[in-house]
């Protein structure tokens, strides 16, 4: 029989692996939701939508594991921050998955009503969000606080690109009413991607909290940027 301490560390490691798996599943969903829309791939859109069940299951498993660790192991210091942050992070990860499903459904709707046209560079916006998610996972695995700050800063580029695409699409709809249906749906997708980036920032702040014990600096910086933005 393993000692209580060994068992505790095994439970923490299992928790980390589940978080990474859940994040990886959501990364796949987001990437393929956009791909399904651009390529008009109804089968891929369906796979993205179905994948949400697996993410929801992991969400429940991780929450249950966290509550068990808190009740039975009574972690302290960094271990307690890890468990508490996991409970917070899964809400953000699960929400990104929900946005991926929303995007896949929009892609399915567009495909059934015609063909997608590249009104704005959604792949570029998606790439920025994907890179943020990749970097925050690397920061979590490598305990890299510098990478956390980089993720938070990257959100500015996402916001700038979203604002540019939003303004362009609104102007396009005013000029040409034949594109209103498509442009409105593309605008929703761009907004969902921008919100995904905000959730990645939330995860980054939790990683920072795990490593430093402080949320204040990153939170204040992000709030100041939000106030000064649009």
Image (cartoon, grey):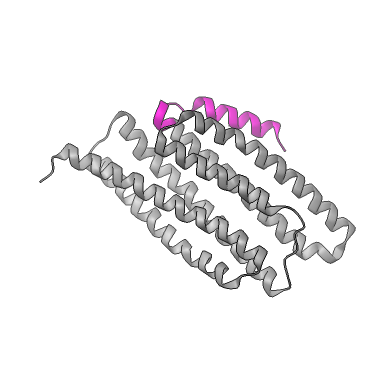
Q: Is residue 73 left or right of residue 33?
A: left
Q: Which residues are magenta?
A: 209-230
Residue beneath the point at 70% across and 35% down: 229
The residue shown at (43%, 58%) is 55
Q: Magenta segment, principal secondary structure?
A: helix
Query: Residue at the spot x=22%, y=40% of the render?
Result: 8
The answer to whether 150 is drawn above or below residue 17 in the figure is above
98, above or below 50, in the image: above
Q: Position of residue 196 (x, y in %)?
A: 58, 48
Estimate the x, y position of residue 159 in percent, counting from the top left: 68, 41
| 73 part of magenta stretch | no
78 lies left or right of 10:
right
User: For the C terminus, which image quadrant?
Assistant: top right
Report if residue 229 lies within the magenta region. Answer: yes
Does residue 106 show up?
no
Residue 156 placement (x, y as % from top left): 65, 36
The picture places residue 211, in percent across and down from the top left corner, at 40, 29
Instruction: Give left or right: position of 213 versus 184.
Output: left
């Amino acid at each position: 029989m393993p000692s209580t301490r060994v068992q505790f560390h095994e439970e923490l490691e299992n928790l980390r692996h589940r978080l990474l798996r859940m994040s990886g599943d959501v990364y796949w969903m987001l990437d393929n939701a956009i791909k399904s829309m651009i390529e008009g791939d109804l089968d891929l859109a369906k796979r993205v939508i179905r994948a949400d069940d697996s993410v929801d299951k992991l969400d429940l498993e991780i929450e249950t594991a966290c509550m068990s660790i808190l009740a039975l192991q009574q972690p302290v210091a960094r271990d307690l921050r890890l468990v508490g942050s996991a409970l917070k992070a899964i809400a953000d990860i699960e929400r990104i998955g929900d946005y991926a499903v929303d995007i896949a459904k929009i892609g399915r709707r567009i495909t059934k009503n015609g063909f997608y046209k590249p009104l704005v560079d959604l792949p570029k916006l998606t790439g920025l969000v994907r890179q943020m998610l990749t970097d925050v996972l690397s920061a979590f695995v490598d305990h890299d606080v510098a990478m956390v700050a980089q993720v938070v800063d990257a959100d500015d580029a996402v916001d700038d690109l979203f604002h540019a695409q939003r303004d362009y699409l609104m102007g396009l709809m005013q000029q040409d009413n034949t594109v209103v249906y498509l442009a409105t749906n593309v605008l929703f997708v761009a907004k969902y991607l921008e919100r995904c980036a905000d959730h990645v920032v939330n995860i980054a702040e939790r990683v920072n909290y795990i490593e430093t014990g402080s949320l204040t600096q990153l939170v204040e910086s992000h709030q100041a940027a939000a106030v000064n933005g649009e």
